Amino acid sequence: MHKVIKQETIIQNCKGLHARASAQVVNLAESFRATTYICHQGLRVSAQSIMGLLMLGAGQGSIVVVEGEGIDADQAVASLVHLIDNKFGE
């Protein structure tokens, strides 16, 4: 059994977790074998679900938790946090 990796970060880009940013999260999450989630205000959705990510309504300044479980969870969580911290390249 793999341990769950969790890391908190803040959505910094001005548009928040919008469609293009969510698509980037999904594409990155799908490149790992780990199961990944994004959590915001008590909601937990798959990082591979664009609709789930959009439903979080995570705007600029929102605190989110990136979770991962599986073989490459450390790398998956670190990569997703890096993407978020770098404002999705905007």
Image: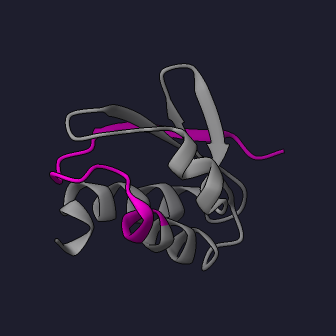
Q: Which image quadrant is residue 71 in? A: bottom right
Number of residue marks? 0
42 is higher (above) or lower (below) than 72:
above
Give coordinates of residue 50: x percent, y percent.
60, 61
**Residue toward you, 76 or 1:** 76
The residue under the point 46% across, 63% down is 22
The single residue placed furthest to the right in the displayed view is 1
Give coordinates of residue 64: x percent, y percent.
40, 35
83 is higher (above) or lower (below) than 68:
below
Q: Is 48 left, or right, of 1 in this rendering?
A: left
Q: Is 34 left, or right, of 76 in this rendering?
A: right
**Residue toward you, 82 or 70:** 82
Q: Is 86 left, or right, of 26 in this rendering?
A: left
The single residue placed furthest to the top in the displayed view is 42
Quadrant where the N terminus is found in the figure: top right
Q: Which image quadrant is residue 38 in? A: top right
Quadrant where the C terminus is found in the figure: bottom left
Which residues make up the magenta segment?
1-22
The residue under the point 21% across, 41% down is 60
The residue under the point 53% across, 34% down is 39
**Residue toward you, 72 or 48:** 48
Give coordinates of residue 67: x percent, y percent.
56, 43
Q: Say if the magenta span includes residue 2.
A: yes
Q: Is 85 left, or right, of 26 in this rendering?
A: left
Q: Say if the magenta span includes residue 64.
A: no
